[in-house]
Image: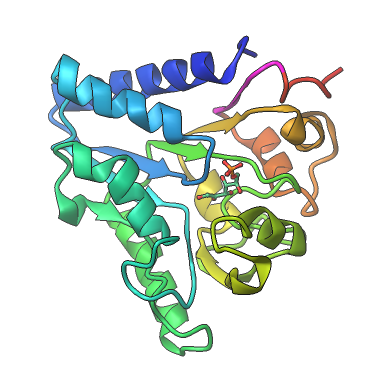
Amino acid sequence: IFPDAADVSEAVATLIKKLVLEAAAQGQHCVLGLATGSTPKEMYRHLVRMHRDEELSFKHVITFNLDEYLGLKPGALQSYRRFMQVHLFDHIDILPENTHVPDGSLATDSPQISLRCNEYERLIADAGGIDLQLLGLGRTGHIGFNERGSSCESRTRRVALGEATRIDAAADFFGKEHVPRYAISMGAATILQARRIVLMAFGEGKAAAVAQAVEGPVTNQIAASFLQDHPSAALYVDLGAAAGLT
Ligand code: F6R
């Protein structure tokens, strides 16, 4: 628990820098699982600063994003691919071919979707698995877009977005009616396979979800509660998000 979000962002960026440097020193790739949304933005700003001012290189980093809205036009303003370009990839020396975000340009009912999802899983495996998976936390306790009812055995797949998630995204889409109904998301099992997991959450709006994830039962109603069974998962929260912990 840190005093505020700025402290969390700096601590997580410093942790990522350490992992990237350690992997480089061993001549290995560092494989990062990344999240979008408001929570990691400041942390990405630190990584960009570390690249610019501290010679942190991302040449040997491979990334896999958690999720992407489905049915978006390529380059759509709200796409998570665009988010990653704007907030991180365009400002560091990562090789474009080493950045992976699920393809959201398919039609929501395309038979190609499950093939692409299986391919995403294969790419993660081919990269040697994820060293560190970064997560945000939905108000309803989702990680990635694993909404209520997502099994702990779920893999990358098409998911239907819940009502609360669509309301939270409404501002980005200029109205809830424009928010996509489906997304592609890594599954809970995909996430749990990462060797290390860091979940960040800020503000009192996340306090109930944090408390349920940490102190509630492990249940498919709160996908973040699955992290309790992971050997190396840590929550990095500010005082507001920690407010519901006993
Ligand atoms: C984003 C993602 C989501 C968000 C979560 C919190 O890639 O997978 O689970 O992390 O919805 O979003 P923010 O950070 O905007 O509160």
Q: Is residue 23 above or below residue 83?
A: above
- Residue drawn at (36%, 47%) of the image: 129
Query: Is residue 205 shown in magenta?
Result: no
The spot of residue 198 in percent (x, y) is: 52, 30
Which image quarter holds the C terminus?
top right
Residue 15 shows in this picture: yes
- Residue drawn at (38%, 51%) of the image: 83
What color scheme is it?
rainbow
- Residue drawn at (48%, 58%) of the image: 67
Q: Nearer the viewer, residue 38 or 189?
A: 38
The spot of residue 38 in percent (x, y) is: 53, 40
- Residue found farthest to the front: 174
- How many numbered discs? 0
- Residue drawn at (51%, 54%) of the image: 190
Query: Is residue 235 shown in magenta?
Result: yes
Q: Is residue 53 above or below residue 90?
A: above
Q: Is residue 87 above or below residue 23?
A: below
The spot of residue 120 in percent (x, y) is: 37, 65
Q: Is residue 219 above or below residue 17?
A: below
Q: Nearer the viewer, residue 148 or 10?
A: 10
The span picked out in magenta is 232-239
Is 74 displayed left or right of 95 in the figure? right
Q: Quadrant of residue 25?
A: top left
Which image quarter holds the N terminus?
top right
The spot of residue 53 in percent (x, y) is: 17, 16
- Residue found farthest to the top: 3
Secondary structure that dominates the magenta span = strand
Is 85 displayed left or right of 230 in the figure? left
Residue 158 shows in this picture: no
